[in-house]
Amino acid sequence: LTESSSGGFIPLWLAVSSPRAGHGPPGVRAFAYKRLLPNVAMRHVVCIGPQGAGKGTQAARIAPMFGLVHLATGDLFRALMAGTSDLAAEVRAFYDRGELVPDALTARVLFAALDERAAGGGVCGALIDGFPRNAAQAEVLDAQILAREEELAAVVHIDVERATLMSRLTGRLVCRTCGATYHVEFNAPRTPG
């Protein structure tokens, strides 16, 4: 670890896996990085990659295997907007003005959802999908995790070839009723329309 000017520490990342030919879906390379920190109560994993890379699909499959809750920012915002809490009102104000939700508020939404889901026990941390998307958001997330005395245990980067992304995104379908995601070729809905 390297000490920063603010008295905190800048994390060192250790690559714990690398892409190998013939492993995983075609056109996809996955990288995982583990940050070396002391033992803490909650450990989180962040899944990053371009839209259509399969972050949500993989996160939903992997999270339960490790006692993590899958937290996707888009899903959290949609669910929050249907409610009437103070946090919902705060987020809705940005939506109503057509503005992006500030990074610090997004982090609050993430950790409020984690705390709510972890209250019943059996949760070791979160698998975060859709946040951070840039360096400023990464700093906000890191600060929030540090303030909670928790750990960012790994960052998984899913790298997908552009042609594969285009195929996935142009065939994507979303149910207007329940928000479920489908694909015309790989996961067609049972009922058309």
Image (cartoon, helix red, strand yellow):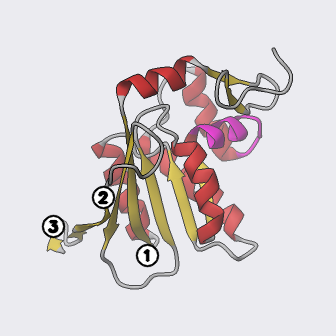
Q: Is residue 130 above or below residue 125?
A: above
Q: Residues within 10 Å of mark 2 (few under 14, many from 20)?
A: few
Mark 1: which secondary structure?
loop
**In the image, residue 42 lies at what x, y percent?**
52, 74
Which residue: 36% across, 61% down?
Answer: 143
Q: Residues within 10 Å of mark 3 (few under 14, many from 20)?
A: few
**In the image, residue 107 lies at what x, y percent?**
49, 51
Contact (Cβ within 8 Å) of mark 1 with mark 2? no
On whether residue 100 falls in the magenta region, the answer is no
User: Is the magenta region chiefly helix, strand or loop?
Assistant: helix
* Alpha carbon distance from label 3 to label 1: 17 Å
**Mark 2, residue position:** 18
Residue extent of the magenta highlight: 74-85
**Mark 3, residue position:** 4
Q: Amino acid at mark 3?
A: Ser
For the residues carrying marks 1 and 2, which lies nearer the camera in this image?
A: 2
Q: Amino acid at mark 2?
A: Ser
Q: Amino acid at mark 1?
A: Glu
**Mark 1, residue position:** 149
The image quadrant where one finds the N terminus is bottom left
Mark 2: which secondary structure?
loop
- Location of residue 72 (image quadrant): top right
Q: Is residue 92 left or right of residue 157?
A: right
Mark 3: which secondary structure?
loop
Q: Residue furthest right?
A: 191
The image quadrant where one finds the C terminus is top right
Which of marks 3 and 2 precedes in the sequence?
Answer: 3
